[in-house]
Amino acid sequence: MEETRKRKSDGMSGQGANARKTKKPWQMPGNKFSPGPSIHPGDAGIWATCDMHREGQCTAELKDLFNDYAGLIYGNTAASNAAVVDEAQLGSDDIEAAISQEMQSLQNFKQEALFVPVKIDVRCVLFFKTREPVEPVSFVHRVCSDAMNKVTSQTTRHVKRLTPMTRMGKATGRSLEEVAKAVLAPVFHQDGISAQKYAIRTTIRNNDTMKRDEVIKRVADLVGEPHTVDLKNYDRLILVDVYRMILGMSVVGGDYEKLKRFNIAEIYEPSSTVDASKTP
């Protein structure tokens, strides 16, 4: 019996010694059922809401809209970064190398794209990761300003609100503080910046741990003096969006209400019976 116990003990200890756990870097969830891009702390991007059961169509509409504006503003930066294989200069012995190079080119293009859609398991909600030179706040402002000033005609049917996010993080108190410091500093805490009036607006979905009042208080404390709160006539509006365990923040200008809170559907087709603040 004693020998049997010893063998069992040795076997368990050996298994424990070999089963070393490796701590993987944390990343925020995208679609847990299929592999694809995910949101990581430090990412920037754009939230979008859409009509019920129209996530696929909305994603396609936004790809076209965003890429059109990327070409207009940044000169098709994403497309110019993709390598091109010149098949005319390749001999028959180079076919395999050409295929490999082309596959790598496509992979590089995907990685370097200015806008990458991320699958989010929240109904009627989409997210597009962005990379430099795209600055989400100014980019979305340009799209909505052009729509408001009738510079462009409507090309989307299912897109509702666009919400730019300057920085993403985990939906935790500690991450909220880290994100807030990074986002607020350039707007409120640089030398030469005068006192500004500001308001804070939060959107929390599918999350029971982040409380609206606590989020607002933490962010207001980090803004600090000499800036003051003004809920109606603000110079700056701080947007805090929480979806499940994902948190994002940005600071937009005083014309946010004039631009229908970046609800592109309301800009193109204002409704007298539907309050833009109550749409998704």
Image (spheres, rainbow, N blue to C red):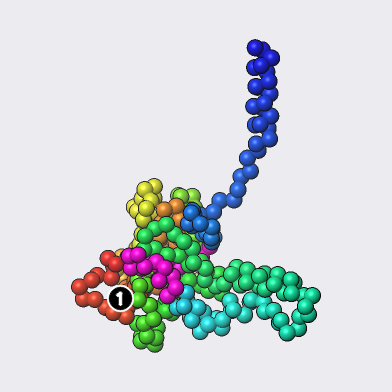
Is residue 86 placed above or below 39 in the rendered structure?
Answer: below
Q: Nearer the viewer, residue 100 or 252?
A: 100
Q: Quadrant of residue 233?
A: bottom left
Seen from this angle, which residue lies furthest bottom?
Answer: 151
Horizontal relation, residue 108 to residue 36: left or right: right
**Image location of residue 217, percent across then percent down:** 38, 54
Amino acid at pointer 1: Glu
Asked whether residue 224 appears in the rendered view, the answer is no
- Residue at the spot of label 1: 266
Name which residue lies at 36% across and 48% down: 208
Magenta range is: 43-62
Is residue 194 placed above or below 179 in the rendered structure?
Answer: below
Q: How many numbered circles are shown? A: 1
Q: Is residue 60 magenta?
A: yes
**Image location of residue 156, percent across then percent down:** 38, 77
Give the quadrant of the C terminus: bottom left
Q: Is residue 102 magenta?
A: no
Determine the secondary structure under disc 1. Answer: helix
Q: Nearer the viewer, residue 210 or 195?
A: 210
Name which residue lies at 35% across and 65% down: 53
Name which residue lies at 48% across and 57% down: 31
- Tag 1: Cα neighbours inside 10 Å, few (<14), some, or many (≥20)? many
**Image location of residue 198, percent across then percent down:** 37, 66
Asked whether residue 86 appears in the rendered view, the answer is yes
**Image location of residue 136, percent across then percent down:** 48, 71
Horizontal relation, residue 100 to residue 113: left or right: right
Q: Quadrant of residue 79?
A: bottom right
Is residue 69 placed above or below 175 in the rendered structure?
Answer: below
